[in-house]
Amino acid sequence: MRLALVLLLVVACSSAKPDTAQQVNRDTLTQRQKDSILAQSKIPGARGVGTAMRVADSTSARAQATDTVGGP
């Protein structure tokens, strides 16, 4: 009787793996998209996220322009 119970538990536990179709439940938004959504929300401090994104974009654009001008 004990052997049957142990075998039953082993079989039940081994077949409890989720389907691969169910495993692919990932978040499809990029970090930038999440930050953009957050910046447009009415959460306190959300405007700061939008401001930080604009400053980062501006700095990145300046750095790219400098690299382009100073390139070989």
Image: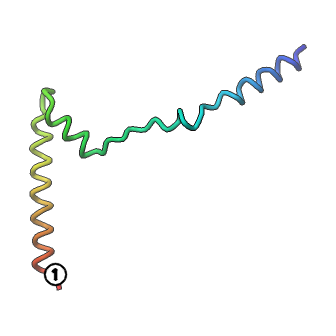
Q: Residue at x 12, y 80 (%)?
A: 70
User: Farthest residue in the front direction?
Assistant: 21
Q: Which residue is mark 1?
A: 71
Q: Residue at x 9, y 52 (%)?
A: 55
- Assign a secondary structure to mark 1: loop
The image's colour scheme reads rainbow
Q: Nearer the viewer, residue 19 or 32?
A: 19
Q: Quadrant of residue 9?
A: top right
Image position of 71 (left or right of 27): left
Image position of 33 (left or right of 5): left
Q: Residue at x 60, y 31 (%)?
A: 18
- Identify residue type, mark 1: Gly
Image position of 22 (left or right of 66): right
Is 58 drawn above or below residue 2 in the view shown? below
Q: Quadrant of residue 34?
A: top left
Q: Where the N terminus falls, by quadrant?
A: top right
Q: Report crowding for label 1: few under 14, some 14 to 19, many 20 or more residues within 10 A (C-alpha).
A: few
Residue 19: image location, x then y, percent? 60, 33
Q: Residue at x 10, y 36 (%)?
A: 47
Residue 51: image location, x then y, percent? 9, 44
Is 27 drawn above or below residue 62 in the view shown? above
Residue 24: image location, x then y, percent? 49, 38
Q: Where the C terminus falls, by quadrant?
A: bottom left
